Image (tube, helix red, strand yellow):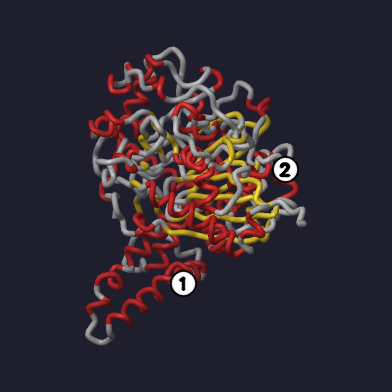
C-alpha cells in the first residue's frame, strides 16, 4: 500500500480557477487543471465603462468541481483519490458577496439569479469610489485611527466600500442580506457543508487586510463607526465576525455531498482560505524582507517581517499589515498595482481593433480563415512588441507613461486617478508606445519599493511569480534594471496553488507548521534577472520624470480639472 500523501491547492484567479494535485513529500505537481469561467468569458454582469465587474457563484462552483475531478482523473482516479489528505484554496480579494442566513450567495436563491448586486463583487470593481472616500473622511472623526493597519487609506476595492455601495443601490439585496462574505471564506464553507453563516471561519488574511479587523481593536471597529457612517450599516457589524483564523487552521472536513461529487473521502481536511497573493508568496518561498510580486492582470506585492521588527511601526499608503496574514507568527505587509498585465492587454486590444472589427468583413478570405488569422496574430502581438521595444535605441526615448489605467492601489490608494502618456510624436510607433507602458508599470513597482524603504522596511530582493513573471523576460529585465535589484523567478507554474497546497498539508497535520511545509515542498527558482548597470542613469532620470508627471495628474485630479496631455 502506498504511503504517499497528496493535497490539492485551488487557486481562483480573475479569469479562471486552477487546481493542482501535489505530493506533500517534495511539492511535485502530479496533475493540474484550469477552468475558464464561462459567464465571465462572455462578459456577463460586467460594465467596464463604469468599472463594474461581477462574477456569478456558479462559475466558481463549476470550476471547483471540474478542476478537482480532472486532476484526479489525470493522476489515476480512485487509486490516487484515497491518498488525498487536504484541500486549501486561495482567491482574489476583496471579492465579497451578499449571503442569506445559510451562507448561500443571494445569486443562488430565487429572484436574484441574474442580479449582479447579488453576485461576487470582484476585486477590480471600482463602483464604490464614493463610498471609499466617505469612509476615509469619516475615520477622521474618531480618536482611534481605525485605518492605521491599512496604510491610512481605505480603498474602493475593499470589503466595506463595496457593502455600502450595494446596500445603497439595491434595497432588495440589502433586505435579504444576512451577512457579507469574502470569496476565500465561502469556498471552504461550501466544501465543508456549512449551512449556518454564524459558524463560518473567517480568514485572518482577508479580514485584516480588507475588513478593518485588528487584534488591537479586539475585532472590527465598533458599531458606532459604521452606524454613524450610514444608517444602512446599523447593527450589521453584529452579523459579521469577531474571531479570525490563519490558513494553517482546519475549517473542517469535506462534506458527504462534496465527497461524493468529487470522488474523495469525507476525512479530507479543508483549510481556512486566504487571498491569492498571500498564498502565492508562501508557494514562492518568501523570506523576510524579500518582496514577493504576484504579477498578473494586477500585481499584489507581499513582504513578511518578524513582528518584533515592526513593533509600533505603521507603514503609510500600503494595503495593510496584519499579524499572521501570510505566515502565522509574522507580520504580513501588502501593496500592489491596480493594473499591470491589464495595461499590456489594454494596448493589445487597442491596436487589435482592425482584427476584431474588420477582418471578418474581408472580401478576400472566408470567415473561418479570418477568425483563425485573428487568433494567430493576437497571440503574437505582445511577444513581438517586446522584441522590437527591446531593440530600440535608449538615446531615442521621448515617450513617458503613467500606469494608472485602473487607478492606483499603492502607494496611497486612489482609484479615481487615470493613466497618461506624454512625449508622443510622429515618430512614435507601437513598439515605442509599448516600451513607455512597460516602463510605467516598472516605475509603479519602484514607487512601492521606495515607500517601504522610506518607512524603514528594507527590501532585499524581489521574488517574481505569476503569468507575466514567467512569460515576459523583457518586462522582468526592465524591472530588475529599474529597481536596481535582482529578481528571482519561481519555478512552479501555479505558485499560488502550490502555496494553497502547502497550507493544506499543514491543516491536515502532515507538517507541523508552514515553514516546514515550505522547506519540504518548495520547488526553487528557475531564473534570476540581474540589473544592467548601463541602464541605471537612464532609468533613474525617467523615474524622476514619472514621479513629476504623476504629481501633475494628481494635482489636477484634486481640482476636478481634466488635464489635456498629448
Label 2 SS:
loop
Is residue 41 shown left or right of residue 397?
Answer: left
Q: Residue furthest bottom?
A: 364
Residue 239 is left or right of residue 45, and the answer is: right
In which image quadrant can residue 131 be found? top left
Q: Position of residue 549 (x, y in %)?
A: 39, 46
Quadrant in the picture for the N terminus: bottom right
Of residues 433 and 24, the one nearer the viewer is: 24
**For mark 1, does the 10 Å Cα neighbourhood hold few (<14), some (14 to 19), or many (20 or more) residues?**
few
Q: Which mark is residue 510?
A: 2
Image location of residue 14, percent across then percent down: 43, 51
Q: Position of residue 97 (x, y in %)?
A: 38, 38
Residue 28 shows which numbered tag? Answer: none
Q: Which residue is rendered at x = 46% and y = 26% of the image? A: 198
As displayed, is residue 101 above or below residue 497?
Answer: above
Q: Nearer the viewer, residue 181 or 347?
A: 181
Residue 266: % across, % down: 59, 44
At 27% across and 28% down in the image, what residue appears?
A: 175
Mark sitting on residue 384: 1
Q: What residue is drawn where x is 56% and y is 48%?
A: 293
Residue 347 relative to residue 231: left or right? right
SS class, disc 1: helix
Query: Residue placed farthest to the top in the image?
Result: 143
Q: Earlier in the sequence, mark 1 or mark 2?
A: 1
Residue 198, can we see it?
Answer: yes
Separation (CA) of disc 1 from disc 2: 46 Å
Closer to viewer: mark 1 or mark 2: 2
Q: Residues within 10 Å of mark 2 (few under 14, many from 20)?
A: many
- At 53% from the left and 50% from the top, the residue drawn is 260
Frontmost residue, 85 versus 414: 85
Amino acid at each position: 500500500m502506498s504511503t504517499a500523501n497528496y493535497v490539492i491547492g485551488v487557486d481562483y484567479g480573475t479569469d479562471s480557477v486552477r487546481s493542482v494535485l501535489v505530493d506533500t513529500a517534495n511539492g511535485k505537481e502530479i496533475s493540474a487543471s484550469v477552468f475558464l469561467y464561462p459567464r465571465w468569458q462572455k462578459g456577463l454582469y460586467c460594465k467596464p465603462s463604469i468599472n463594474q465587474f461581477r462574477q456569478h457563484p456558479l462559475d466558481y462552483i463549476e470550476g471547483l468541481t471540474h478542476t478537482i475531478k480532472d486532476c484526479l482523473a489525470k493522476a489515476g482516479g480512485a487509486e490516487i483519490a484515497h491518498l488525498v489528505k487536504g484541500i486549501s484554496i486561495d482567491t482574489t480579494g476583496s471579492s465579497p458577496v451578499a449571503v442569506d442566513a445559510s451562507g448561500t450567495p443571494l445569486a443562488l436563491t430565487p429572484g436574484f439569479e441574474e442580479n449582479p448586486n447579488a453576485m461576487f463583487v470582484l476585486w477590480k470593481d471600482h463602483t464604490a469610489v464614493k463610498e471609499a472616500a466617505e469612509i476615509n473622511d469619516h475615520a477622521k472623526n474618531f480618536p482611534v485611527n481605525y485605518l492605521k493597519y491599512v496604510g491610512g487609506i481605505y480603498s474602493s476595492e475593499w470589503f466595506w466600500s463595496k457593502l455600502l455601495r450595494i446596500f445603497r443601490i439595491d434595497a432588495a439585496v440589502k433586505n435579504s442580506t444576512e451577512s457579507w462574505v469574502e470569496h476565500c471564506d465561502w469556498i471552504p464553507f461550501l466544501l465543508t457543508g456549512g449551512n449556518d453563516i454564524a459558524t463560518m471561519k473567517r480568514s485572518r488574511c482577508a479580514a485584516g487586510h480588507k475588513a478593518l479587523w485588528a487584534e488591537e481593536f479586539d475585532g472590527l471597529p465598533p458599531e458606532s463607526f459604521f452606524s454613524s457612517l450610514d444608517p444602512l450599516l446599523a447593527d450589521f457589524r453584529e452579523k459579521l465576525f469577531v474571531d479570525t483564523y490563519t490558513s494553517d487552521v482546519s475549517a473542517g472536513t469535506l462534506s458527504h455531498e462534496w465527497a461524493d461529487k468529487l470522488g474523495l473521502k469525507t476525512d479530507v481536511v479543508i483549510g481556512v482560505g486566504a487571498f491569492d497573493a498571500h498564498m502565492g508568496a508562501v508557494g514562492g518561498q518568501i523570506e523576510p524582507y524579500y518582496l514577493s510580486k504576484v504579477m498578473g492582470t494586477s500585481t499584489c506585492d507581499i513582504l513578511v517581517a518578524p513582528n518584533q521588527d515592526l513593533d509600533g511601526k505603521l507603514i503609510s499608503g500600503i494595503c495593510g499589515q496584519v499579524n499572521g496574514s501570510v505566515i502565522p507568527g509574522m507580520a504580513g505587509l501588502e501593496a500592489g498595482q491596480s493594473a499591470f498585465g491589464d495595461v499590456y492587454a489594454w494596448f493589445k486590444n487597442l491596436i487589435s481593433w482592425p482584427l476584431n472589427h474588420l477582418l471578418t468583413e474581408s472580401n478576400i478570405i472566408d470567415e473561418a480563415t479570418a477568425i483563425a488569422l485573428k487568433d494567430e496574430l493576437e497571440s503574437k502581438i505582445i511577444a513581438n512588441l517586446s522584441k522590437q521595444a527591446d531593440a530600440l535605441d535608449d538615446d531615442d526615448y521621448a515617450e513617458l507613461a503613467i500606469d494608472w489605467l485602473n487607478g492606483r492601489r499603492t502607494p496611497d490608494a486612489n482609484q479615481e486617478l487615470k493613466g497618461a502618456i506624454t512625449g508622443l510624436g510622429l515618430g512614435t510607433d507601437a513598439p515605442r508606445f509599448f516600451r513607455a507602458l512597460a516602463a510605467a508599470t516598472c516605475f509603479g513597482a519602484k514607487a512601492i519599493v521606495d515607500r517601504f524603504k522610506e518607512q524603514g522596511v528594507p527590501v532585499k530582493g524581489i521574488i517574481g511569480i505569476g503569468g507575466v513573471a514567467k512569460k515576459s523576460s523583457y518586462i522582468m529585465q526592465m524591472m530588475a534594471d529599474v529597481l536596481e535589484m535582482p529578481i528571482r523567478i519561481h519555478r512552479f507554474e501555479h505558485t499560488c496553488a502550490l502555496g494553497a497546497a502547502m497550507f493544506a498539508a499543514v491543516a491536515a497535520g502532515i507538517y507541523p507548521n508552514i515553514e516546514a511545509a515550505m522547506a519540504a515542498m518548495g520547488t526553487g527558482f528557475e531564473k534570476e534577472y540581474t540589473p544592467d548597470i548601463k541602464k541605471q542613469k537612464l532609468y533613474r532620470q525617467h523615474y524622476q520624470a514619472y514621479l513629476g508627471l504623476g504629481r501633475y495628474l494628481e494635482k489636477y485630479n484634486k481640482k476636478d480639472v481634466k488635464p489635456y496631455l498629448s
